Amino acid sequence: MKGMGGHQSASMGKDEWITPPEILEALGEFDLDPCSPVVRPWSTAKVHHTIHDDGLSLPWSGRVWCNPPYGRETGRWLARCAEHGNATALIFARTETRDWVEHVWKKAHSVLFLWGRLYFYHVDGTRAAENCGAPSALVAYDELNAFFLEFSGLSGAVVRLKRR
């Protein structure tokens, strides 16, 4: 498995990218980050699992922050977020993909479509020179995390998803 807690970008030449600190600060404290980078300039949760721990297979508890590897593995992480419930995930807003249909549109509680494109960070804490190249969204899998999205102060639009 590659790129834990990272964002795949062929043009950037690496898989590991760090969540912008303003996103984390706006969403409040998380108990667990199951796909945290090994090296991180700031904490994303009280407990961090890295690629060395295989956070996807370990037990999850409490409020979970998930900035999953982007690419083929994203759906597995989103499925786990949906199963756990008390989770927020940061992903690209590629709303037509299978992962979105199966694990966001069908299972999530709410989505915050962020305005503008994010600038992720390197593991040394410096901001990337270029934005991530695609729009991003925060996905809440329960009422509590939806509340944090709605009152985060982050620029964007929150959409509550209708259950079928």
Image: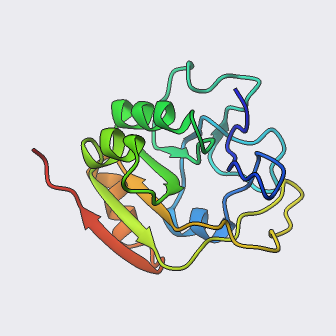
> Is residue 67 shown left or right of residue 151?
right
Question: Is residue 58 depicted above or below 98 in this figure?
Answer: above
Could you tell me residue 91's position as x and y percent? 52, 53
User: For residue 41, what is the image quadrant?
Assistant: bottom right
Residue 76 in picture, x, y percent from top left:
48, 30
- In the picture, the quarter occupied by the C terminus is top left
Left or right: where 37 falls relative to 66: right
Q: Quadrant of residue 95?
A: bottom left
Which residue is depicted at the point 43% across and 30% down?
80
- Chosen colour scheme: rainbow
Please give left or right for residue 82 compared with residue 29 in the image: left
- What is the residue that sits farthest to the right in this orientation? 124
Q: On the picture, is 90 further left or further right than 122?
A: left
Residue closest to the eye, 43 or 113: 113
Asked whether residue 42 is in view, the answer is yes
- Please say if 66 is above or below 2: below
Question: Does the image show residue 86?
Answer: no
Q: Looking at the image, which is closer to me, 44 or 114? A: 114
Q: Residue at x 80, y 50 (%)?
A: 40
Picture coordinates of residue 96, whole percent (x, y): 36, 53
Q: Quadrant of the N terminus?
A: top right
Residue at point 60% right, 34% down? 34
Count all numbered tags in the image, as a single digit: 0
Residue 140 on image: x %, y %? 37, 52
Residue visible at 13% across and 47% down in the picture: 163
